[in-house]
Amino acid sequence: MFDRFKAGLKSPAGQFLLMFGVLAFTLFWVLATPQAARLFVQPFTQGLVHVSQTLVAVFDSRVVADGDILRFNDGRGAVQVLAGCNAVEVCALLIAAVFAYPTTFVRSAIGAVIAVLALQTVNLARIISLLYLSRGEPSLFEFFHNYVWDAMIGLEGMVLFFTWAHFQPAQQPQASREVEA
Amino acid sequence: MTFTTADLSAFILSRGDGGAISDVNLWATTANADGYTLSGLMRYTTTLATSGYSVMVTNTAGAAPAIPTLGEWAMILFGAVLAGAAALYVQRRRLSV
């Protein structure tokens, strides 16, 4: 039983899972510290509100950024962007998966940067769309917030990871590498 | 939380609709008689009384609705599916070389 467990850990899948677990735990632990909240999470979240407002201002001057709140200046419709609304946790899981994948550090770093940029772009679209939905039908807002965007973000994370992984060179099995040596 | 008409009349008038709004959620920043400033999504219910409009304002949510990217369970599901599918992919890719 223990031997099978040890063999499982030595397999590529086992090593990936172990590395993914360690990296994800470390990233979440770092993000949960008060220092990270103060120096990174909070400014980043408020930055998202301001970037959203700047983007919307191109075609709609009624939207104002008020701290962590994005709202219409006539009061009809507002959303609050808090720590859990900035897609940082999803990015952390994706970064953990990308760096746990057996490839070079440079390839992983490039993949992580592209994945984070793509996720944050979609998250901006999510925030802006929910702001407009909050102005209309509350049931439609709840549906999009709880189901549509949850599924979209999850799906995007999967597509980003597997598209990136598809373009990584395949690793040789350990046995054949030993034979070659 | 309920405010008197006096607390809110300035806000209502500044909106230019003179109390015509009824039973809607609005973002409001207002000060009550004690001088506290309140901001948040508030439900306005206006009724026509003999003395004019009376406005009752209820602070419904305290603030605008927060919009978490993924719920707690969705995050757990995403992490588990990503890790599981990626592990299978890594294993198969190694074996197929």
Image: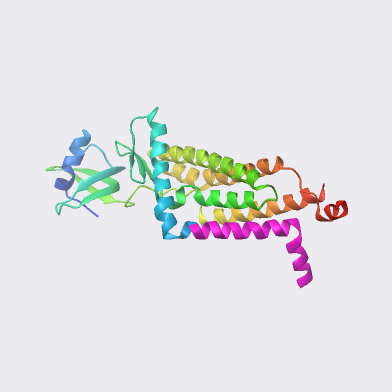
Decide if residue B73 is on the left or right side of residue A161: left
The spot of residue B4 in percent (x, y) is 17, 50
Residue shown at the point (40%, 42%) measured from the top left: A47
Q: Nearer the viewer, residue A76 or A22?
A: A22
In this view, which residue lies farthest toward the bottom?
Answer: A2
Q: Nearer the viewer, residue B54 or B74?
A: B74
In this view, which residue lies farthest toward the right?
Answer: A179
Q: Where, by quadrant of the figure, is residue A156 drawn?
A: top right
The boundaries of the magenta stretch are A1-30
Residue shown at the point (39%, 54%) measured from the top left: A38
The spot of residue A33 in percent (x, y) is 45, 60
What is the quadrant of the N terminus of chain B in the image? bottom left
Give the vertical position of A101 relative to A3 (above or below). Answer: above
Q: Examine the structure image and report whether residue A22 is included in the region drawn in magenta.
A: yes
Decide if residue A61 is on the left or right side of residue A122: left
Q: Is residue A21 visible?
A: yes
The spot of residue A79 in percent (x, y) is 39, 44
Q: Main secondary structure of the magenta part?
A: helix
Q: Nearer the viewer, residue A45 or B12?
A: A45
